[in-house]
Image (tube, rainbow, N blue to C red):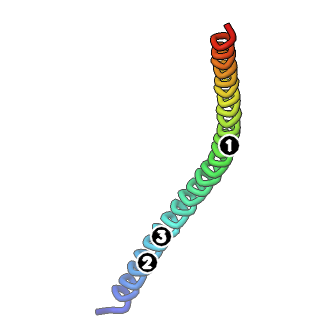
Amino acid sequence: MNGTSRLQRVQDDAEEVKVIMMENMNKVEERSDKLGDLETRAEDLHEKAKVFEKKTNKLMRQKRCENQKMRYVFIGIGVVVTIVIIIAIIVTLVG
């Protein structure tokens, strides 16, 4: 093997390594972009989760108030029915 072909082979190898390194750098950049996108999506999801939690807490308080109101209505109806029954019994006993 002469010096020229040996030099050419070394240059070819160096060029091949250069191409591989450029491909690797491109892949690293793509992964970095994808990680950035993923981070953005994760932040968006986190914000949406906060909003969801606030809405569910508000809805839970609202439903609790509605249930409390219904409880008062039923208690009121029960008291009225009890009073009507007591009055009916008294009227029956007196009259």
Query: What percent of the width, then of the height, locates residue 65?
Result: 71, 33
Mark 1 and mark 3 lie on one chain; the one further toward the N terminus is 3
Q: Is residue 17 left or right of residue 64?
A: left
Which numbered disc flags the more N-terminal residue, 2 or 3?
2
Quadrant position of residue 15: bottom left
Task: Residue at 52% x, 60% y: name it.
Answer: 30
Gap in Å between the C-alphas at discs 2 and 3?
A: 10 Å
- Mark 3 belongs to which amino acid? Asn
Q: Secondary structure at mark 1?
A: helix
Of 22 and 62, nearer the camera is 62
Name the residue beneath numbered marker 1. Answer: 57
* Residue sitting farthest toward the front: 94
Other-residue count near label 1 (Cα within 10 Å), few / some / many at <14 / 14–19 / ≥20: few
Residue at image mark 2: 17
Q: Which one is in front in this view, the residue at disc 2 or the one at disc 1?
A: 1
Q: Picture quarter containing residue 89? A: top right
Q: Is residue 91 above or below residue 10?
A: above
Tag of residue 14: none
Dot 3 lies on which element?
helix
Dot 2 amino acid type: Val
Q: Give the image location of residue 22, x and y in percent.
A: 49, 69
Residue under the image location 65 percent in, 14 percent down: 93
The residue positioned 37% from the left and 87% from the top of the image is 4
Disc 2 is placed on an element classified as helix
* Mark found first going from the N terminus, 2 or 1: 2
Q: Position of residue 55 (x, y in %)?
A: 67, 39
- Counting from the top left corner in percent of width and height, residue 80 is at 69, 19
Residue sitting nearer the eye, 63 or 93: 93
